[in-house]
C-alpha cells in the first residue's frame, strides 16, 4: 500500500464562522440538557391538595442555555431579561464588579453589576447560590415588576407537614409545668384550732352542758345540793384518700418525673378533701360531720328567703355568741361573702370595710400567717378565712344561691387525726398489666367541744 500525504484542510472565513457557530450551538444544547436533567422534578400533587406544588407565573425559571446564547450573541433579548438579572445579581454577590479597561462595551449591558465582558455570564453553581441569587433578584426593581422570584421558589409553609411543618417541632416547656389552681386550705390554717392525735376510730368527748351553779344561805341555814348536767358526743373518724393507677412506661418517660407529680398532687388533693369535709361533711358515713350543720351550734339566719350580708348580721352573730359566753375569733366563709361586704358603701360613696384611713376605695384586708391561706378582717379584728369549696348553692326559702358562714371561738374546735397523710406504692396490684398503683390515705375528723361556741349563719346570698 502506498502512503499518501494528507493535504492540509483549508477553510474559508465563512466556513470557519459556521463551524464555530455549530460548535457553540451544540455546547449550548448540551448545557441546557445537563441543567434540565439536574433540575429536580416537581413531585406529584396529593389528591387532597388544593393548589399546585409550585407557584406558576407567566415566566419560566432562569435557563443557563438562554444565558449562554446571549453571551455568544453579545446581547440580551427581551425574552432573556430574567437570565440577565440572574447573571448580574450573581456577579454582585460573588465578586465580579465592573468591566475591565479595554473591553468592548455593549450599550445594552448595564455598567453597574456587569460581568467582566459583555460576552461573559456569571451563573450560580449550587442550589444554595441559586437561592441567594433569586432572593437578590427579588429585590431588584425589574424583577419586582414581573414577579420572577415567585415562579422559581417553592411555596413552602409550616402550616402543613408536607410543606415544611415536619421541620418545626412543638416545644413542651416542661420547666414551666404549672399545677392547677385549687382552693386554699381554711380550717387547718386557723391558728386557735388545736389538733389531737388519736389511737382509735371512735372518740367520745364528754362535756358539762349545764353548770351546777352556786347559791347562798343564812347562818346555819340548810344547804341545797346542786348538780351539773353532763353530756357527751361521739365523733367517728373517717378515711379520706386519693388513688392513682398508671403505666410503668409513663413512670419511666414522664418529664417532670411522674413520682414528683404524684407526691405533690396526691397529698394536696387529700388535704383539700379533708378541708372540704371539715367544712361541709354531712355526717353520713363515710363522711364526717363538718362544721356547717353541726348539731347544737348557735343558729343565726340572714332571712327566711336569704339576703345579702351586711355588717349588722355579723355584729348580731357576735352578740349571740357573747350571750352564751363565747367570743368569736375566726370566720370561715366562701370568698363571695367578703366580696359582698367589701362593696358596701356609706352615703358619701366610701367603702365602709376599708374606710378606716379615709381611702375612697377597697384596700387589702391583710394576709395570713406565712404559708397559710389568705384572709380578710371584719368587725375590725376578726379574721375571715376563705374556702371556695364551701357551697354557694344552698336553698333557703325561695332562694337557691345561699351559703353558710361559720363564726366562732377557735379554742372550742378540736381536730382529730388518727393518722397523717401517708403515701404508698404497689407494683404488684396490676402486675399482669405492667402498671403501678399509688394511694394517699388520711384519717381524721373535726369536733366542737362546746357546740354552741360556734355559730352557723345561714341564708347568705351574693
Image: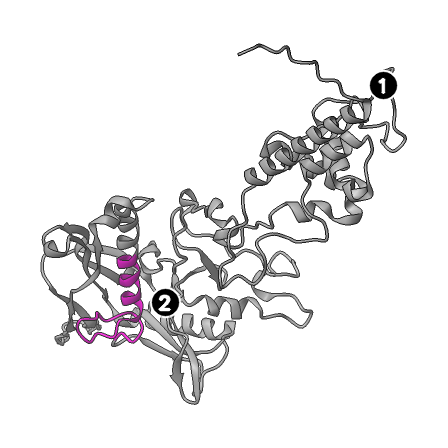
Earlier-in-chain disc, 2 versus 1:
1
- The residue drawn where x is 63% and y is 45% is 153
Taking depth in this image into account, of 399 and 384 the one nearest to the observer is: 399
Residue tagged 1:
103
Highlighted range, magenta: 269-294
Q: How is the image coloured?
A: one colour
In the image, residue 145 above or below residue 355: above
| Kind of element beneath mark 1 | loop
Please say if the residues under marks 2 and 1 sit with CB atoms less than 8 Å apart: no
Left or right for 133, reference 290: right
Taking depth in this image into account, of 345 and 249 the one nearest to the observer is: 249
Percent coordinates x, y for residue 393 in the rendering: 40, 78
Percent coordinates x, y for residue 310 in the rendering: 51, 74
Left or right for 223, reference 357: left
| Kind of element beneath mark 2 | loop
Taking depth in this image into account, of 365 and 300 the one nearest to the observer is: 365
Seen as rendered, the residue at the extreme right is 107
Report if residue 151 is visible in the image: yes
- What is the number of the mark on residue 129? none
Q: How many marks?
A: 2
Left or right for 441, reference 302: left
Q: Find out whether residue 323 is within the magenta segment.
A: no
- The residue drawn where x is 33% and y is 44% is 255
- What is the number of the mark on residue 389? 2
- The residue drawn where x is 12% and y is 75% is 225
Q: Find out whether residue 281 is within the magenta segment.
A: yes
Amino acid at each position: 500500500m502506498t502512503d499518501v500525504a494528507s493535504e492540509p484542510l483549508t477553510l474559508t472565513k465563512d466556513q470557519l464562522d459556521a463551524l464555530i457557530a455549530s460548535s457553540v450551538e451544540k455546547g449550548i444544547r448540551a448545557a441546557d440538557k445537563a441543567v434540565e436533567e439536574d433540575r429536580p422534578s416537581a413531585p406529584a400533587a396529593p389528591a387532597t391538595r388544593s393548589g399546585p406544588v409550585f407557584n406558576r407565573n407567566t415566566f419560566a425559571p432562569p435557563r443557563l442555555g438562554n444565558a449562554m446564547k446571549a453571551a455568544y450573541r453579545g446581547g440580551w433579548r427581551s425574552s432573556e431579561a430574567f437570565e440577565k438579572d440572574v447573571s448580574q445579581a450573581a456577579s454582585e454577590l460573588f465578586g465580579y464588579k465592573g468591566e475591565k479597561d479595554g473591553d468592548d462595551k455593549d450599550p445594552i449591558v448595564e455598567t453597574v453589576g456587569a460581568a467582566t465582558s459583555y460576552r461573559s455570564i456569571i451563573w450560580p453553581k449550587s442550589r444554595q447560590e441559586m437561592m441567594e441569587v433569586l432572593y437578590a433578584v427579588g429585590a431588584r426593581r425589574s424583577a419586582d415588576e414581573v414577579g420572577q422570584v415567585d415562579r422559581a421558589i417553592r411555596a413552602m409553609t409550616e402550616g402543613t407537614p408536607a410543606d415544611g411543618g415536619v421541620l418545626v417541632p412543638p416545644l413542651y416547656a416542661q420547666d414551666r409545668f404549672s399545677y392547677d389552681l385549687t382552693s386554699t386550705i381554711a380550717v387547718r390554717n386557723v391558728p386557735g384550732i388545736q389538733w389531737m392525735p388519736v389511737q382509735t376510730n371512735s372518740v367520745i368527748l364528754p362535756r358539762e352542758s349545764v353548770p351546777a351553779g352556786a347559791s347562798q344561805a343564812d347562818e346555819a341555814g340548810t344547804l341545797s345540793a346542786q348538780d351539773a348536767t353532763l353530756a357527751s358526743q361521739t365523733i367517728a373518724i373517717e378515711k379520706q384518700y386519693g388513688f392513682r393507677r398508671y403505666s410503668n412506661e409513663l413512670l419511666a418517660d414522664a418529664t417532670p418525673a411522674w413520682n414528683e407529680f404524684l407526691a405533690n398532687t396526691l397529698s394536696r388533693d387529700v388535704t383539700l378533701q379533708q378541708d372540704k369535709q371539715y367544712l361541709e361533711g354531712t355526717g353520713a358515713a363515710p363522711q364526717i360531720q363538718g362544721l356547717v350543720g353541726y348539731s347544737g351550734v348557735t343558729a343565726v339566719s340572714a332571712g327566711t328567703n336569704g339576703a345579702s350580708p351586711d355588717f349588722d348580721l355579723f355584729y348580731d352573730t357576735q352578740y349571740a355568741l357573747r350571750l352564751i359566753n363565747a367570743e368569736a375569733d375566726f370566720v370561715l366563709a366562701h370568698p363571695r361573702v367578703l366580696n359582698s361586704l367589701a362593696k358596701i358603701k356609706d352615703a358619701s360613696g366610701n367603702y365602709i370595710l376599708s374606710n378606716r384611713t379615709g381611702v375612697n376605695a377597697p384596700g387589702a384586708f391583710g394576709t395570713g400567717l406565712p404559708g397559710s391561706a389568705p384572709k380578710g378582717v371584719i368587725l375590725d379584728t376578726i379574721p375571715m378565712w376563705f374556702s371556695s369549696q364551701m357551697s354557694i348553692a344552698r336553698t333557703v326559702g325561695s332562694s337557691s344561691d345561699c351559703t353558710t358562714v361559720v363564726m366562732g371561738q377557735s379554742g372550742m374546735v378540736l381536730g382529730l387525726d388518727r393518722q397523717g397523710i401517708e403515701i404508698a406504692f404497689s407494683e404488684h396490684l396490676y402486675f399482669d398489666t405492667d402498671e403501678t398503683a399509688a394511694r394517699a390515705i388520711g384519717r381524721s375528723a373535726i369536733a366542737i367541744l362546746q357546740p354552741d361556741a360556734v355559730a352557723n349563719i345561714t341564708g347568705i346570698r351574693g
